[in-house]
Image (spheres, helix red, strand yellow):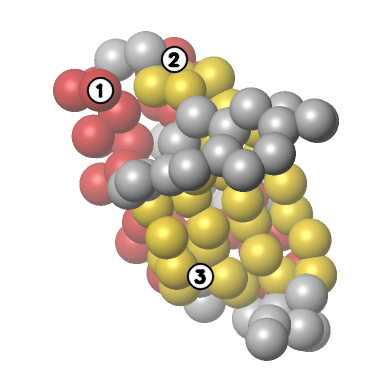
Amino acid sequence: MTAYLIVDTKISDPDAYEEYKRLARPIAEKFGGRYLARGGAMEVIEADLWSPTRMVLIAFPDMESARGFIDSPEYAPVKPIRHANADCTMVLFEGTGA
C-alpha cells in the first residue's frame, strides 16, 4: 500500500535549506519516493490540531520504502542540515490513493 510522508517545515535559514533540498530529493527518489507537492501557496481551512507552515508531500511505494529512506545511511548526514535550518513535523502514513 502506498505510504505518504508529510513534512510541515518552518525554515529558519532559506539559503542553507536549499542544500538540504538538493541532497534529500535524490535519496528519496532512490527509495521510490515521488514528490507530489513541495511548498507553494497554501490556505489553511481548519487548524484545530496544528497550524501548518510549509508542506511537503512525498509518496513512496510502501511503508518499508519510506522507512528505508528515513533510516538510510545516505540520508543520515543530510538530516542534520534540516534540523539545523528548520523546525519540522513529519508524519508517515499508509493510504490507498484516490
Labels 1 and 3: the sequence-earlier one: 1
Residue 75: give x, y in percent of width and height.
50, 45
Residue under label 1, please give it.
Answer: 14
Residue under label 3, please give it.
Answer: 33
Q: Amino acid at mark 1?
A: Pro
C-alpha span from label 3 to label 2: 23 Å
Q: Amino acid at mark 3?
A: Gly
SS class, disc 1: helix
Q: Is residue 88 left or right of residue 98?
A: left
Residue 39: give x, y in percent of width and height.
37, 45
SS class, disc 3: loop
Say which of 74 and 54 sits in front: 54
The image quarter containing residue 44 is: top right
Q: Does 35 sit above or below residue 76?
A: below
Labels 1 and 2: the sequence-earlier one: 1
Whether residue 39 is visible: yes
